[in-house]
Image: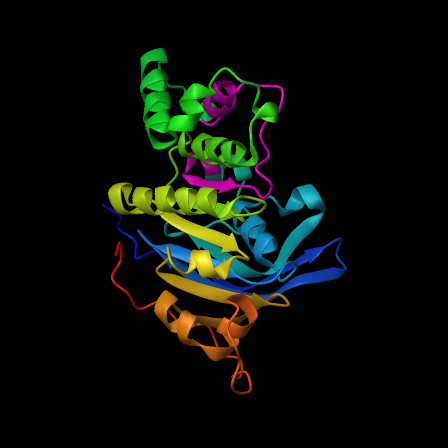
């Protein structure tokens, strides 16, 4: 059982690239343990930067977090080593799937368990559990990942992350370039893992219509700031959110910015 209420908390986080470009302008949010939370917003709003600030991958792109604090599982990780975070159960699935194209599907999956030093039998058992989640990967296990479909590559990327045994998964744009049926299948699997295993998830997504059907709470990011926050039901009902992200029609002026508030819903619901 988790002894902390929020598995993740960001407090007034700023992020810059090259010491010049301010990408995040005081992001504050929480992910309660056992919940699924969405970061919604247009391309360039700051969703990916937020995830990479959490996973400490900004340095690979000459980025940094000069201000603010990030906490994971009750400890501050603002300056943590990325590899240590993976070993501690914080795992990111990068935008664009990022499979190793010249390795087989199964070899890609096995890379996720590399830091865990499993026995041969334990690794076999966990691969079988992953194939049970993604049956089509079982049929493609010997195929080079670069020759599989976009949907299959996304499943490989998520399956590889699951083999690292995450407590918190950061999922970046899982719907990008995929058919609606595949997107629904992936979100259903992620939500199922949340409910059955207690996996906490922070998902960055432009497709708000799909995301809000599968999450507990959401934050709308605009220009590196949190512009809206609320439960999935509340965000669906907000006129400006419907207009900008759900294809609805606006009947009034957008509401003013609000300070992000703490999610108020039953954990694990």
Range of residues picked out in magenta: 86-112
In screen coordinates, is 21 left or right of 239? Answer: right
Please give the name of the residue rendered at 35% of the width and 16% of the height, measured from the top-left corner.
124
Q: Is residue 9 visible?
A: no
Q: Could you tell me which residue is drawn at 39 percent across and 31 percent down?
A: 134
Quarter of the rendering occupied by the C terminus: bottom left
Whole-percent x and y of residue 25?
Answer: 62, 67
| In the image, farthest residue toward the top | 120
Out of 151 and 9, give the one closest to the viewer: 151
Residue 164 visible to an observer of this rendering: yes
Within the image, what quadrant is residue 31 found in? bottom left
Instruction: Estimate the x, y position of residue 215 in percent, counting from the top left.
Output: 37, 57
Q: Is residue 263 left or right of residue 157?
A: left
- Residue 240, image x, y percentages: 52, 77
Q: Eyeballing the image, is 146 above or below 65? A: above
**Does residue 98 belong to the magenta stretch?**
yes
């Amino acid at each position: 059982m988790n002894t902390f209420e929020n598995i993740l908390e960001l407090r007034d986080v700023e992020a810059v690239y090259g010491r010049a470009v301010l990408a995040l302008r005081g992001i504050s949010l929480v992910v309660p343990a056992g919940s699924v939370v969405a970061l919604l917003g247009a391309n360039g709003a700051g969703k990916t930067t937020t995830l990479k600030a959490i996973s400490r991958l900004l340095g690979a792109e000459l980025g940094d977090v000069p201000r603010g604090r990030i906490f994971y599982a009750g400890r501050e990780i603002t300056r943590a080593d990325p590899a240590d975070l993976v070993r501690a159960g914080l795992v990111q699935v990068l935008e664009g799937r990022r499979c190793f194209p010249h390795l087989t599907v199964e070899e890609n999956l096995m890379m996720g368990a590399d830091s865990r030093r499993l026995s041969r039998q334990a690794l076999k058992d966990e691969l079988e559990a992953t194939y049970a989640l993604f049956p089509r990967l079982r049929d493609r296990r010997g195929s080079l990942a670069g020759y599989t479909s976009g949907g299959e590559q996304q499943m490989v990327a998520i399956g590889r992350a699951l083999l690292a045994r995450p407590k918190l998964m950061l999922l970046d744009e899982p719907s990008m370039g995929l058919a609606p049926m595949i997107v629904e299948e992936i979100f259903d699997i992620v939500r199922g893992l949340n409910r059955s295993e207690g996996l906490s998830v922070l998902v960055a997504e432009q497709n708000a219509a799909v995301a809000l059907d599968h999450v507990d709470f959401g934050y709308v990011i605009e220009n590196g700031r949190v512009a809206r926050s609320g439960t999935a039901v509340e965000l669906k009902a907000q006129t400006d959110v419907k207009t900008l992200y759900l294809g609805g029609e606006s009947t009034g002026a957008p509401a003013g910015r609000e300070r992000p508030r703490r999610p108020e819903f039953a954990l694990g619901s």
